[in-house]
Amino acid sequence: MSIVARFALLLAVAAPVAAQPAREWCAKLPRPANAALPPVHVSEWYRVYRVADGVFALVEPEQWQEAIAYLIVGTDRALLFDTGIGVAPIRPVVERLTKLPVTVLNSHTHFDHTGGNWEFTRVAAMDTPFTHASQAGLPHAAIAEEVAPGAFCGAPPAGFDTATYHTVAWRASETVRDGTRFALGGRTLEVLHVPGHTPDAIALFDRANGVLWTGDSYYDGPIWLFAPETDLAAYERSIARLVALGPAVKRLLPAHNSASVDPAALGKTLVAIRAIRSGRATPRDATAAQRVYEVGGITIVTNAAALNKR
């Protein structure tokens, strides 16, 4: 898909920032799961937490997406899983946390996870048409609402220009696929291709330590499954794959909101998406644009186009 076509589709389905009232969202900060983690004071914009030995969560709680990037450090090299929304440089923060060579890998290539990709020379990516289109970045008009006054809990980062914000084009330096492994030294990470939210969505699994990074396949909050690239059938299969990992998973580290979640949430998500796709669940809210379902404590936001896709 060309960047022009993708831009048009993004405008057609983008949910307004008003859907996340600033005062309600600000009142939830800090998220309890994050407040329970040891803080690491290395940035004014990013709230950095030590999730485990050699694992840091770089949270952007003062922008409504509450995106989370993760720096995973071995003895020989490090991996940065996602690079945030791009309103503040992320590389200086990473360099305060490690002096090792860093490879960037994205949970998927929506703009709120690739904003700092351009700052790095080593970027690993899936080889899909969606990924290639995402590398062009997005113009200000496509994502202006992400930096509107109501998008921030307080002021934007110092020196940031809300009138010109856009995502910078980036280039992949290497390709990954399902089963690719990153040996960091004392820690090995396995790529699991879990399409559904996007065609290039992946999870990252540290099997030895029972840690699973879920990207946007699961996070603590309403799960958005309504973009043109969304495939609910693929999403159901992907969640089933993650659930099948069973007790090998001891912690979930999602890409938004809470940086540490109970793995039981995956099973609840599978029950929810199956109920929705089978027609057994009734939407809490239904408009021409979106349908909001709540099933067993899981909220999923989708639409008729995604539900009817074959």
Image: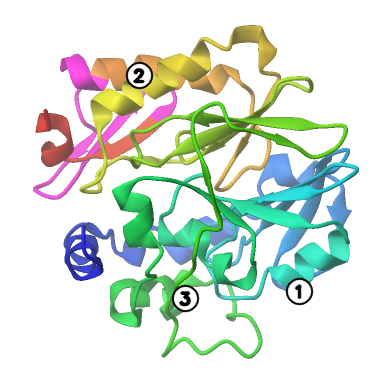
- Spatial CA distance of label 2 from label 3 is 33 Å
Which mark is drawn over residue 117?
none
Q: Earlier in the sequence, mark 2 or mark 3?
A: 3
Q: At 47% across and 65% down in the image, what residue appears?
A: 22
Residue 289 counted in the magenta span: yes
Residue 29 shown left or right of residue 100 in the figure:
left
Q: Nearer the viewer, mark 2 or mark 3?
A: 3
**Residue 250 appears in the figure:** yes
The residue stretch that appears in magenta: 276-298
Q: At 58% across and 47% down in the image, what residue appears?
A: 257
Q: Amino acid at mark 2?
A: Arg
Between residue 307 and residue 294, name the one nearer to us: 307
- Please identify the quarter of the rendering in which residue 226 is found: top left
Which mark is drawn over residue 237?
2
Q: Secondary structure at mark 2?
A: helix
Point out residue 181 in the picture as x, y percentages from the top left corner.
65, 32
- Spatial CA distance of label 1 from label 2 is 40 Å
Q: Amino acid at mark 3?
A: Val
Which mark is drawn over residue 44?
1
Q: Amino acid at mark 1?
A: Glu
Q: Which residue is mark 3?
A: 168
Q: Secondary structure at mark 1?
A: loop
- Please identify the quarter of the rendering in which residue 233 is found: top left
Between residue 230 and residue 257, name the one nearer to us: 230
Q: At 78% across and 20% down in the image, what residue appears?
A: 208
Tell me, yes or no, whether the two marked residues, 2 and 3, touch with CB atoms within 8 Å. no
Residue 234 shown left or right of residue 23 in the figure:
left
Quarter of the rendering occupied by the C terminus: top left
Point out residue 33 in the picture as x, y percentages from the top left corner.
70, 39
